[in-house]
């Protein structure tokens, strides 16, 4: 039995060894008012919402990225909590061409005020990385909020 468990552990470690490292979300985000149209008018009925821009460094081997907004992901394991078959939050695809300066970025329009939690992962030819450690931003007024650590 011990030999079997050792074999399983080696296989798991060997499989995970080839996976890419999870990206690291920048500790600063950008928050803007929620506006639209050529004139940049506030969105009627959504004046209290905001737009947040989240950044991370480019992985030059990336094929694609995914961001989990509001998800329950354990920082220690990079695993998404799917207890009961469902998990809160929304997974958003981010293409490798979605850049802000030299970083990859995600713009989330119509964001609620308050704490907004993000995790990101990258897909390369080796497969998908685990989910990153979370970045948690207190979205309020326009500006540059910094990450506020919060455990699940």
Image (cartoon, helix red, strand yellow):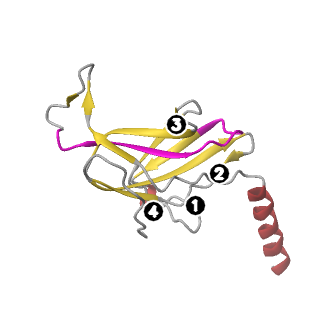
Is tag 3's residue or tag 2's residue first in the polypeptide sequence? 3
Q: Between marks 4 and 1, how big is the CA–CA gap?
A: 15 Å
* Residue at x-position 75% and y-position 45%: 126
Q: Residues within 10 Å of mark 4 (few under 14, many from 20)?
A: few
- Mark 4 highlights which residue? 83
Which region of the structure is painted magenta? 47-64
Q: In this view, does 36 lie above or below 112?
A: above
Select label 4 or label 1 by which is in front.
1
Is tag 4's residue or tag 2's residue first in the polypeptide sequence? 4
The answer to whether mark 3 and mark 2 are in CB contact below 8 A is no
Q: What element carries label 2?
A: loop
The answer to whether mark 3 and mark 1 are in CB contact below 8 A is no
Select label 4 or label 3 by which is in front.
3
Q: What quarter of the picture does the C terminus occupy? A: bottom left
Q: What element carries label 4?
A: helix
Residue 131 position within the rendered picture, expressed as x and y whole percent measured from the top left: 57, 55
Nearer the observer, 93 or 108: 108
Any mark on residue 78, and which? 1
Q: What quarter of the picture does the N terminus occupy? A: bottom right
Judge left or right: residue 131 versus residue 10.
Answer: left
Q: Between marks 3 and 1, how big is the CA–CA gap?
A: 19 Å
Is tag 3's residue or tag 1's residue first in the polypeptide sequence? 1
The answer to whether mark 1 and mark 2 are in CB contact below 8 A is yes
Q: Is mark 3 on a helix, strand or loop?
A: strand
* Residue at x-position 50% and y-position 45%: 55
- Mark 3 highlights which residue? 94
Q: In this view, does 149 lie above or below 123?
A: below
The answer to whether mark 4 and mark 1 are in CB contact below 8 A is no
Is tag 4's residue or tag 3's residue first in the polypeptide sequence? 4
Any mark on residue 129, and which? 2
Select label 4 or label 2 by which is in front.
2
The answer to whether mark 4 and mark 2 are in CB contact below 8 A is no
């Amino acid at each position: 039995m011990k030999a079997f468990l050792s074999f399983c552990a080696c296989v798991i470690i060997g499989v995970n060894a080839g996976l890419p490292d999870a990206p690291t979300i920048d500790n600063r985000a950008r928050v803007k008012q929620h506006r639209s149209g050529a004139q940049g008018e506030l969105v009627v009925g959504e004046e209290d919402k905001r737009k947040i821009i989240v950044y991370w460094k480019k992985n030059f081997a990336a094929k694609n990225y995914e961001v989990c907004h509001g998800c329950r992901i354990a920082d220690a394991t990079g695993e998404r909590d799917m207890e009961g078959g469902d998990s809160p939050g929304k997974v958003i695809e981010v293409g490798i061409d979605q850049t802000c300066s030299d970083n990859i970025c995600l713009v989330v329009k119509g964001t609620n005020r308050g704490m907004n939690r993000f995790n990101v992962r990258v897909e390369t030819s080796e497969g998908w990385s685990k989910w990153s450690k979370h970045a948690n931003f207190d979205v309020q007024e326009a500006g540059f909020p910094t990450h506020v650590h919060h455990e699940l």
